Image (cartoon, rainbow, N blue to C red):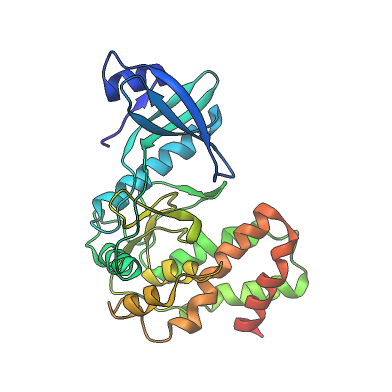
Amino acid sequence: MEWKLFASLEEAVREICGNDRTVTGRNYVAGGDINTASALHLDDGTCLFMKSNAASFLKNFTAEAEGLAAIRKAGGPMTPRVLGAGREKGGSFLLLEYIRGAAPVRDYWEIFAAELAAMHKAVPKENIGFGFASDNYIGERSQINSPRKTWTAFMRDCRLKPQLEAASGYLDREDRKRAEHLLSHLDGLLEEPEKPSLIHGDLWGGNKITGNDGKCWLIDPAVYYGHPEADIAMTELFGGFPGAFYRAYEETGCLGDGYADRRDLYNLYHLLNHLNTFGGSYLSSVRRILKRYVG
């Protein structure tokens, strides 16, 4: 772990930036819907990016830090460097490198596709199968990452089943029958990849930014070792990326034959998570997918 936990923000600033450094200003940054985001200005002109929330969110911040660090080490798209996390005045914080951004480079989307594929193709740093060394979060909700030997078992036990159980109050009798049938027949619907791949886990347009180098950087991960198709499916759920990204990614060979037939299965997890987080407006989308695969 290259970052560390601090007892206070003052301690973190001193150790990260120097004993004489102090915070001279803070302005809030728009965009977050769970945490408060701020730019911290120091007396030497340095700027740090800080997320803050209640003290109980420290575990969310440490999980996010671990995810960002894992992506950064995988040799794919860049992420903001994690500087530290800790508690401050009854709350908690996460400190990251401040990204000012730059004009997008030429072939921005094609480069992003190639870098994402490089991350997906990288040899796993951990020999744990499908899952991750620790649980983390998908939005506000906890995400189970207990390792499994097969992708199908992981999707069933750690992704779809927990969300379906949490959504039981929304589902009627027919929904539940379809869900049970789906879980028991997943092995005939999913494709087993050659190896587990590190994936972002929550890859939609709001979780990418343009970095200081003008290329696409990743933020707000929900990482685990899974199937690359799950990342690509998520990009298509809420609006999608430009065609140049998908054409370039397809050329990398990371998508298996029949990916389009599996896409909704991967996104069922995210739609169930939205149903359990935001309420019944997502129920019709969940039902559509259950009916598609079960009838």
- Tell me where residue 253 sits by quadrant: bottom left
Number of numbered discs on residues = 0
Residue at 32%, 77% (x, y): give it.
Answer: 248
At which x and y percent is residue 220? 45, 49
User: Up-down: is 238 above or below 34?
Assistant: below
At which x and y percent is residue 38? 49, 33
Q: Is residue 159 left or right of residue 15?
A: right
User: Up-down: is 166 above or below 48?
Assistant: below
Q: Nearer the viewer, residue 148 or 203?
A: 203
Quarter of the image that includes the C terminus? bottom right
Q: Nearer the viewer, residue 172 or 217?
A: 217
Residue 52 visible? The answer is: yes
Residue at 51%, 67% (x, y): give it.
Answer: 156
Residue 188 visible? The answer is: no
Residue at 30%, 49% (x, y): give it.
Answer: 70
At which x and y percent is residue 261? 50, 84
At which x and y percent is residue 169? 75, 58
